[in-house]
Amino acid sequence: MASATTKANSWLLIEHSGPWPRKIEELGLPVIDRAIAHGVRPQLIRRSGRRAQTPPLRVYVGWSGENPWLETRVVSDMAELDDLDLAAVALGRRPGFGEPTLEPLLLVCTHAKRNACCARTGTPLARGLAAGYGDLVWETSHVGGDRYAANLVCLPHGIYYGALDGETAREAVDAYLRGEVVLDRLRGRAGIPEPAQAAEHFVRAHTGLLGLDQVRVISVTGTGPYMTRVTAAGNVWYGTVELVSSLGGCGHDCDETVETYQMRDLALHSEAALV
C-alpha cells in the first residue's frame, strides 16, 4: 500500500458535525475555497458519537513537511477565519492563528457520501480508537485512497495507514506516539511524490529503521521508472521504482483501480558504510 497518499503537506481542519457533502467545497465556506487555492488541504472533522451542532468549534492548521507543527483555536464564527494566512501555512510557516499544540491528531476517514467503504469500516474504527486515545481522535472527510478503507492519518507528520482493523490501528497509533512507523498497512507520508513514498518504504523494510526521521528521500528523477536516492541512518541507498496497476478495491461497491510501485536494483552507495 505504500505510495497511496495525497501530496498535500499543509492542512486546514474545521470541526463540522455534518452531514458532509460528497465534495466539501459544496458547503460554500469561503475559507475552504481559499485553502484549495493556496494548496492547503481542507478537511472536515468531528468527534465520534458526540458532535457539536453549533459554534464554538475547533479549527486546526498544520504542516507535515520538515519540522511539522500544528496550531489550534476555538472559533465562535467562521468569519474569524477570514484573516487566516493560508499562504503562510502552504509554505510551512506558522500563521499565529492559534495556540501551538504538541498533541498529535489521529484522523479516521468516515466520509460516507464519498465512498460507502469509509463509513462501513471507518466509523467503528474511529469509535474504537476514541475509546482508547480520547480527544486525539477525530472522524474526518475524504483523505484519499478509499480503496484502502479504513484509513488513518497521523498529524502533524502526515503518516497514512490503510486497510486497518482495531488491532492494526492500535499498533499504528502506538508506534506514532513513540515516534515510529509500522510497515504493516503503511500507506506513506503526505507531501512527497508517490515514488518517493515507495522508496522510503522499501528502504525501511530493507534496513529495519522505523523512526519517523530516520529515513528521508533525497531525490526522485525520471518519469517512470523512477531513480530514487534515500538517506537512512547516515547511509545512502539508490534504487529504481516502477508503477504497476491492477483491478481491485475495498468491497463490492468500490470499483477503483489499485496502483502501487515495485522496487528493483536497491543498492547501498555510501563510502562511510563501506569502510
Image (cartoon, helix red, strand yellow):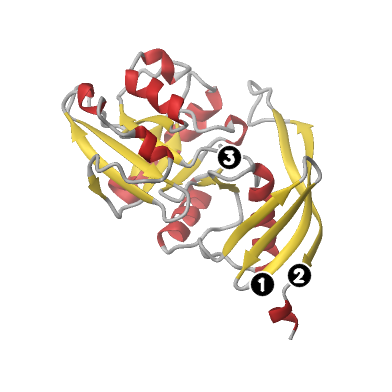
Spatial CA span between label 2 and label 1: 7 Å
Residue at the spot of label 3: 5
The answer to which image quadrant residue 253 occupies is top right
The answer to which image quadrant residue 164 occupies is top right
Spatial CA span between label 2 and label 3: 27 Å
Mark 1 lies on a secondary structure that is strand
Q: Position of residue 187 (x, y in %)?
A: 60, 46
Looking at the image, which residue is at 49% across and 54% down? 172
Residue 165 tag number? none
Residue at the spot of label 2: 268
Spatial CA span between label 3 and label 1: 26 Å
Looking at the image, which residue is at 44% across and 29% down? 38
Mark 3 lies on a secondary structure that is loop
Residue at the spot of label 1: 235
Q: Considering the image in quadrants, where does the N terminus appear?
A: top right
Circle 2: residue type: Leu
* Residue at the outermost bottom position: 275
Q: Considering the image in quadrants, where does the C terminus appear?
A: bottom right
The reply, left or right, for residue 151 in relation to residue 237 is left
